[in-house]
Every structure is written in C-alpha cells, then in structure tokens.
C-alpha cells in the first residue's frame, strides 16, 4: 500500500502531528458553495470522521482533512509538523501552501475526480470530491507526503532560506511518509466512500430526528386541541352560555399562541349581519364597532369570509381595499393583519367567522392555516352544540307552533310565582283562556290556517301583558296568562286582572287575516277563567284546576266573557 521513509518514526504514539482544527491553515475561501451544498453540509455531522481519520493516520502515517467548499474544515486528523510548525507559519512557504490549496480546490470545482499537486515546498497533496445525493459538498484532502525518497539537501537549503532551525526542520521532514502514487486513487476512493456513508447516515439520522420532532409537535398540538375540545364539551354539558364558552375557547387559543388576538363573530338569525361573539383581547370600542357588521364583499376580512364561505387572508390591513372603511378602528386598536375563516356546520351553512389579528403585517404559514381551520372547527362545535342544547331546551319548554312557554315551563313558573308571592305577600292572578269559535277555522280552512290563527292570537296576548308576565300555550286552542305579583291589595289586584282580561278578549276578537290574497278574515271570541292567589297553602296543580273550572263557568254563562273562580 505505502512505504514509509526510513526516517519515519515507527511508534505512532511518537509521531509529532498538529491539530489543523485549531490552526489558521485555511484562511482563504476557495469558492462560494451553492445553496444545495451548504444545506447538505449543514445537515451532515462529520465529527465521527475525526476519530476515523486519526486512526488511519496512526496506521498509515497519512494525514487527512475534509474541507467544505467555503474553506471550513469539516473533519481532520492531526497534521504533519512540517506543515503546521514550519510551512504554514512562514509567509513565503505559506503562500506556496495556498497555491496548492487553490489548485486542488479549483480542479475539484471543474469536475475532476482526482487531483495531485506537488507543492513548491517539496511536499505532495492530493484530493477528491465528496458527492452526497449528486451534490458536491466538500473535498477530501490527503497530504503532506512524498512520492519518492526526499532530497534532504533541498530541504536543508529551503530551511536555511526560510530561516528554519535546520535540525528541527529536517526531523519534521523525516516524519513525512512516502506513498506510492499508483495507490493514491484507491486510497482516496476508500476514504471518500467512508465519508460518504457516514454523511448519508448522519443526514438520515437527522431527517429521522426532525420527523420524530415534527410528529411529537403535532401530537402535542393535537393533544392541546383535544383538551380544549373536552373543555368546551364540559362547559356545554354544565349548561354554560355560548358567550362564556367562546370567550374561554379564545383565551385558551391565545395562551397557546400569544402573538394572536382572536375573535369569533356569529351570524345573526337573518343571515345578513355578524354579531359579537367573543374577543376578550380586542378593545371594547373595536368589538362594538364591528358588532352588526353586514356580510358582503369588501366588508373587512370577516364580512367577506361570511359572505363567500371561503377563508380571507389580509396580510396588510392598511393597504387592503376590504379594510379601507375601517382604518380608523383598526389603527386605534393597533391591528395590522387579519386572517378570517368562516365557521361552517356539517351542511356547509355559515354560522359565523373565526378571525385572527396581528399587530404587524404577516401571512400565515401552511401550518398556521391548518390551525386556523381546526380552531374554526372547535368554534363550530361550540356553536352547534350550544344551538342544539338551546333547541332541545326550546323543545322541552316552549311550544313549537307559537314559540310560547309550554305546559312544563308554565308549571315551573307558576311554582316560582307561588313561592315569590308567599315571601312578598303580593297577589298574583292566572287566566285560563279558551277560544270559543276556533273549530270552524280548522273545519273550513284546514289545520294549516288554524295554526296561523293560533300563532297570531298568541302574539296578540303577549303584547297585552308585561314583560315579566307569562303567556303559555296550554294545549289545542287554550292559553294561560300568569300575572306575577300585581299588588298587595286584593281588590286592586282583582281590578287590574279584570282590565287585562278585557284587553285580551278585545285583541282576540279583532279580525284575523287568514289568506292575504283573498282577503279572507275570521273573528275569534274567548272564554276566560280567572283565579287569584297569594301563595297561602296553594299548589300549581290546584290553581290550574280552579282556573280551568272558572273558564267553563264563563262558557256555561254564554261564552265571550270572563269569570272568577267560585268554589
């Protein structure tokens, strides 16, 4: 493979070599690497080659270095004393070393697979390129060595010329190995193959580490989202209001992403406006300013997103046409970018928008776009579950036809009225209303028209009484009116109840427009039973029976009148 000079010391532990990693031996950039070369070099960990090169040096006496295209030393064995203590520290000989470096690097850049250079200092270097994934990322150098027995007279003369200590210099030259030239290509191929395999393994390991790190991050983020989802579901099950649920959700998202300020706007029942849902980190004046925002093209990011049903990303609010009408608001709130995602249910219906604001102009990354979509889904979950809970509540407590409280809710409110009356000593009154001539409506015009009549009458009764009072549909064409805590004086309370009963009878008796096209109308009359109570040993069921009995007394007396309950 190689023969060593007779002057070369046999014991590798006595070979006097120096560490080029800490020396200024490569102070001139050879070439500017392209991006691919730089990326591959950064992605490879060559530190394991240092030990490999040192072992090779101990076995063969040949120094090795892997040098990046920018001149940085990526890995190296110790280096010859002749080079590091003599040639590289003298200006004249260092320039000759530099010529060798540049010549070899230049040939590598030209696509040579192997290059040999006999330095004017009397030593020889050679190099080969290191190719990773078809990219030239570094050069593998071996040197300094002799191809034949050295001319000691030449080195003695050179040492005298350069001012070196002759004995020390010749001792250093004696440590330089002699390598047969025909063996160099095979030697370089061996070393380059080892370096290539180590680099590729390093890159694969780093890629695996990055993949694992990315997966772990995704799992962590998904875990956080599931925890947030569970929190939302827990709040819904506990009966929390939608506003509180959305505010909590937004606050949790902002804790995960402190650079964001989030907002949820809800589409109003008309489908034409966005109403404030939750935006705890935005100023009150801003939330008030966008409350009632019309949906449509150019209505900021959220109004446009709700209108189109598509995400709207505005990188720079100040210079975007959608935001020009709102600049006074956004500048006062220090808002520079807004990314809005429509909140849709499973049927694709828009329920509102989830918006993210930033204080500086910016675009979302692909990962951030995915997060926005997922947070929009969380908002949809909160809104839909809340709407479902509200729907269930309405089905349980409200009449589906008229929207009035049903019998179940009436009984709850009646029990509360009894308890409150007992504490306050004020009288309450209840009316049982039955329509006298409703059956002909169904018989002549059908049940659909009959439903319209019941809805209109329920609405008329509701407008006669106070906001605090209760109007309920008891069943069929029967309605209940509960007058809460009218007065402490019994006579005054009865008088007030009769006045209201008279107004209710009058409003029921007004003509009802059944079919607008044909101008068909109908008049209903009513029989009303009244009962007075103050909470003394009274039950809801008993009061309902008494009011029902009073209503039948009114019917028995000829209908279209009211009667007080008489035991």
Image: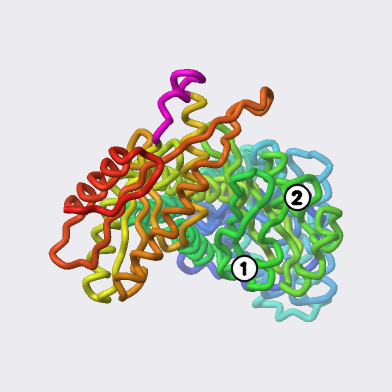
Q: Is residue 61 above or below residue 345?
A: below
Q: Residue 487: give x, y in percent of width and height.
A: 35, 73
Magenta span of residues: 436-447
Horizontal side of 54 relative to 552 (left or right) equals right
Horizontal side of 436 relative to 140 (left or right) equals left
The residue shown at (71%, 81%) is 165
Q: Front-most of 129 and 3?
A: 129
Q: Is residue 115 above or below residue 436?
A: below
Q: Front-most of 169 and 305?
A: 305
* Residue 475 within the segment the image draws in magenta: no
Say few, some or many: other residues with alpha carbon within 10 Å of mark 2 (under 14 / 14 to 19 / 20 or more). Answer: few
| Residue labelled with disc 2 | 35
**Mark 2 / mark 1, whichever is N-terminal:** 1
SS at circle 1: helix
Q: Residue 213: give x, y in percent of width and height.
A: 47, 52
> Residue 21, labelled with which disc?
1
């Amino acid at each position: 493979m190689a023969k060593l000079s007779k002057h070369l010391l046999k014991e590798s532990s006595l070979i006097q070599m120096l560490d080029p990693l800490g020396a200024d031996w490569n102070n001139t950039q050879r070439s500017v690497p392209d991006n691919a070369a730089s990326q591959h070099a950064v992605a490879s960990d060559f530190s394991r080659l240092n030990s490999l090169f040192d072992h090779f040096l101990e076995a063969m006496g040949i120094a090795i270095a892997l040098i990046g295209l920018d001149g940085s030393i990526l890995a190296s064995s110790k280096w010859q004393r002749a080079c590091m203590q003599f040639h590289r520290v003298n200006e004249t000989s260092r320039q000759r070393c530099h010529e060798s470096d540049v010549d070899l690097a230049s040939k590598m850049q030209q696509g040579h697979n192997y290059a040999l250079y006999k330095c004017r200092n009397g030593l020889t270097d050679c190099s080969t390129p290191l190719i990773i994934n078809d990219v030239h990322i570094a050069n593998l150098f071996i040197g300094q060595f002799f191809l034949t027995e050295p001319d000691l007279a030449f080195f003695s003369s050179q040492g005298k010329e350069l001012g070196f200590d002759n004995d020390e210099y010749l001792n250093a030259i004696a440590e330089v190995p002699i390598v047969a030239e025909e063996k160099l290509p095979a030697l370089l191929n061996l070393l380059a193959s080892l370096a290539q395999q180590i680099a590729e393994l390093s890159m694969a390991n780093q890629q695996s580490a990055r993949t694992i790190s990315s997966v772990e991050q995704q799992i962590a983020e998904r875990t956080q989202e599931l925890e947030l989802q569970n929190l939302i579901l827990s709040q819904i099950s506990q009966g929390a209001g939608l506003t509180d649920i959305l505010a909590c959700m937004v606050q949790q998202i902002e804790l995960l992403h402190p650079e964001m300020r989030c907002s949820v706007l809800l589409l109003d029942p008309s489908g034409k406006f966005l109403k404030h849902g939750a935006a705890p980190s935005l100023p009150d004046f801003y939330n008030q300013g966008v409350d009632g925002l019309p949906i449509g093209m150019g209505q900021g990011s959220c109004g446009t997103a709700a209108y189109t049903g598509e995400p709207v990303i505005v990188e720079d609010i100040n210079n975007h046409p959608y935001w020009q009408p709102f600049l006074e608001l956004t500048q006062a709130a220090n808002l520079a970018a807004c990314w809005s995602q429509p909140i849709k249910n499973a049927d694709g219906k828009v329920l509102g928008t989830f918006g993210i604001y930033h204080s500086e102009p910016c675009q979302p990354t692909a990962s951030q776009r995915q997060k926005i979509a997922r947070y929009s889904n969380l908002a949809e979950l909160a809104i839909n579950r809340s709407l479902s809970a509200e729907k269930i509540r309405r089905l349980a407590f409200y009449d589906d036809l008229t929207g009035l409280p049903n019998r179940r809710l009436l009984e709850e409110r009646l029990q509360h009225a009894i308890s409150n009356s007992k504490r306050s000593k004020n009288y309450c009154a209840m009316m049982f209303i039955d329509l006298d001539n409703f059956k002909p409506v169904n018989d002549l015009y059908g049940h659909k028209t009959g439903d319209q009549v019941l809805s209109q009458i329920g609405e008329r009764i509701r407008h006669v009484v106070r906001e605090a009072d209760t109007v309920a549909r008891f069943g069929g064409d029967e309605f209940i009116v509960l007058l809460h805590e009218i007065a402490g004086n019994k006579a005054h309370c009865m008088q007030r109840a009769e006045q209201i009963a008279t107004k209710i009878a009058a409003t029921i008796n007004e003509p009802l427009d059944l079919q607008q096209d044909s101008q068909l109308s109908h008049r209903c009359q009513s029989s009303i039973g009244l009962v007075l109570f103050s909470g003394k040993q009274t039950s809801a069921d008993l009061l309902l029976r008494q009011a029902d009995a009073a209503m039948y007394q009114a019917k028995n007396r000829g209908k279209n009148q009211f009667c007080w309950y008489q035991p």
